[in-house]
Structures are given as C-alpha cells and as structure tokens.
Image (spheres, coloured by chain):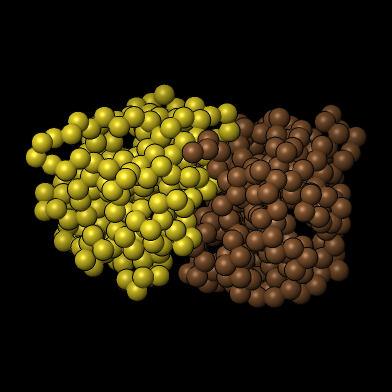
Amino acid sequence: MSKKPAIRIIPCLDVTEGRVVKGVNFTNLIDAGDPVEMARVYNAEGADELTFLDITASSGARETMYEVVNRCAAEVFIPLTVGGGVRSVDDVDRLLRAGADKVSINTAALARPELINEISGRFGSQVLVLSVDARRANTLSGFEVTTHGGRKSSGIDALEWIEQGCSRGIGEVLLNSMDADGTRSGYDIEMITRARQVAKVPLIASGGAGALEDFDLAIKAGADALLAASVFHFGIFRIGAVKEYLRGRGHLIR
Amino acid sequence: MIAILDYGFGNVRSAQRAFGRHGIDAQITSNRQECIEAHGLVIPGVGAFAACMDGLDRVEAAPIVDARLLANRPVLGICVGMQVLFTEGVEHDIPRSGLRQWPGIVAQLPAEILPHMGWSEINSAPDSELFKGVENERFYFVHSYATQKWDLQPSESLAPAMVSWSEYGAPFIAAVENGPLSATQFHPEKSGDAGATLIENWIKQCL
C-alpha cells in the first residue's frame, strides 16, 4: 500500500451561459459543448475530479451555473470544484448546496484576503481552492499574480500569496500559468517547483499541457493533480491515454 | 426508508443523490422517530469535529444512535460522521468528546501536505461486507484528521469488528464494520463506481 494518493487528472470546463468554451489565452472562445454531457464523458473516461469555471460570472448568469452544477452532481459521482465570480461566503454556500464539493476563489480573495478565513471558518478548509493565475514578472520570486484572465497585474508576488493563502486556511492551490495557458507548450515547470516548496496543501498544476511528457514533468516537479482543458475538449488526448502513459512512467494512477 | 441525518454539517444532498443512484429516495431529516425507525441511518459530516459535535448535540444524535444500535439497525458514518463515533477528536490542540461508540482519538495526520486529498488505496478487512467486489479499488478522501489506532477489545459474545486501513503520513483507519455500526473515512458518495458498489453493499444490510 502506497502512502500517497493517486495523481489526479482533472479536466476543466470553462462555462458561460450554460455552455463549455475554451480558447487560447482566454480569447477567441470556441464552443465545445454541454457541460453535463462532457462531465459524464470525462467521468466514464476516468477523470478523477472535475472543475467548472464560470468565466462570465455576471450576476445574471449565476442562476444558470447553479443549475449546471445541480444537474452535474445528480449524474456524476466524483468531486466537483466550481469557480469563477465567487465573492462571498453566501456564494460558496449556494454552490455547495447546488452540489459542488469544492469552490475556487481568485479575484475576490486578492481584493479581501480575509474572505479565505471566513470561508474556511464556516465550511472547513477542504472546500476551498485558491486559484492563482500567475505569470513571470519582476517580483520577489519572479512570479506575480494576475487578474482579469491574465490581462492585469495585481502587484502581488505569487509565492507569497500562496503562503498567505495556506496560513489563512485554504485546502488546495490551483496554480495556472498565464504565460502557458492555452499554448499547449508545456506546464511552467519552474513555477510548479517553486510553488511546491511553499505550499502546505495539495497543488494542482494548470496551463500549457500539450504533450504527454508535459504531465510527467509536472508530476516530477511536485504537482499532486493536473488540470487541463483544451487537450481533452478537442480530443488531442483521451484521459485514459494520459493515465495509461503516466502509469507506464511509474506514477500512481487510479 | 434510508434516513440521512440533517444536523447542519455534511453534504446531505450528495449522500441523498448517491442513494438515488440505486433507486432509493433517502430522506434528509433530523426527526427523532424517523431517524430511529429508518432501515438505515447515514451520518454525513464535513468540516471541524467540534462544530459537527455541536450540531449532533443540537439534534440529540447520541440517543438516536444508541437506540438504533440496540435494535440492531444499521448506521453509516461518513468522513467526520465516522470520526465523531470515536471517544474524542483533537483539533488545534483542543479535545472534544465524540459519540464514544468506539475507543480512539481522532488526531491530525503526521504529513507535511494536508489535507489528505485524493484517491487512495485501502487494505480492506478480509471478510468485509462493504468492500465486497471493490476490495482493490481506490476511494476518495478529503481529511486532515483520522484515528490511527484500533483499540476496541474483542468480546466473546460479539463478532469482532472488521477494520480497513489506508495510509497517509501514517496508517489510519479507513473504514470500520462493527455489527450494525459502520463508517468510512473516505467519501463513498464521491468515489465513482467503487463508491456506488460500497453503498449498494451497505443498502443490502439495511433492507
């Protein structure tokens, strides 16, 4: 019996108006289908977890998202994380009630870090994923946190932010490389390595998966879970094939 | 009827949906009579041990569980719903008394990265009913605390408890089957098809 859980493979569905989209660097969005149908397919293919990211997150579209989450949770029995536009304890409460197991927060926590304490104090740290959209920049660690899908600098150092998140009570870090996102040129391995050194919680690597080797390298750099969108949506790799490859490389796979 | 104890903690809807998968319309309730008379009672639980115990005290869960066990009616604790069955839980150095069905202390796992989050292997008890057909499957865990020692002394009059183990930082108890009282530290309702089989195995004990 091994001491570590299996490496989790997590397809991410970017959702707007109840539909899945994904585009290079968050622009030029291409419609890739119904989220619940895709969740069902990914579950059948062996996804270890699912992530829905509400990329419109305007108040009017929130109701649609709760419905999508509710429908998904009724059909797919693996952990579901939902993020995008989560601004308050009440937002978290509604998503958990709709059927989310975890909620990811990003911009709202940057604006008011106490939100992390409030959410974990109410629901436990295990429900809270800190989503960090980071890029290379001239900050202390060489990585900074961005907002608005990578378009704006927050002026906050990414590694310091992760450390602060851990001390405030997050349960997991979703580290998304905004330089690599959508490029399929590989995960930012140095960023993962550095984040692993400071994170006291499980680390999900995201952004840039394009070749099978990329997944292997991210695990070796310390990722506990690997998130990808476009390579799965467009059928470049099937989840089963990624898991088979990683098993062959000696990683623990469900 | 399967009842899911509603005490303000734990994802009761997830548990309910997991039974719906087997055609069972589980009732989310804290009604004393319903909870005592149901064919099976599920105690879910997420978050802090002490907060869950406060919630359980408010719905007077302890006498409900006692009454069910005396009548040999199945009870299933999930995650913190399992932890509260032990003597006490210690979170942030503060001990809190549990439902004291089993001797044992729930304490933080000695691991650098917490919580233990993900699909882990289980060393299932040889004659386990719950793991029948899924003995070698992984199940989904999310927790930082666990019981690391099984202390219940076997009695001559009762069948010995079946204890299944997992490991994260140290070996810990992943599941217990002790007469009508069963519990899992992992989340069968989130463990895909393996979890569905385990729940089905438990349902068979209830009906």
The residue lying at 48 percent from left, 69 percent from top is A74
Residue in front for this viewpoint, B140 or A72: B140
Query: In the current view of this chain or complex, which residue is farthest to the right?
Result: A138
Q: Where does the N terminus of chain B fall, quadrant-wise? A: bottom left
Which quadrant of the figure has residue B32?
bottom left
Residue in front for this viewpoint, B41 or A221: A221
A235 vs B135: above or below:
below
Please identify which colour was used for chain A in the image.
brown
The residue lying at 20 percent from left, 40 percent from top is B160
B108 vs A47: above or below:
above
In the drawing, does residue B156 fall left or right of residue B53? Answer: left
Q: Where does the C terminus of chain B fall, quadrant-wise? A: bottom left
The residue lying at 45 percent from left, 51 percent from top is B136
Q: Position of residue B125 (x, y in %)?
A: 33, 44
Q: Position of residue A2 (x, y in %)?
A: 52, 38
Q: Among the chains, which one is yellow?
A: B
Which quadrant of the figure has residue B49?
top left
The residue lying at 84 percent from left, 29 percent from top is A140
Residue in front for this viewpoint, A182 or A145: A182
Residue A243 in view here: yes
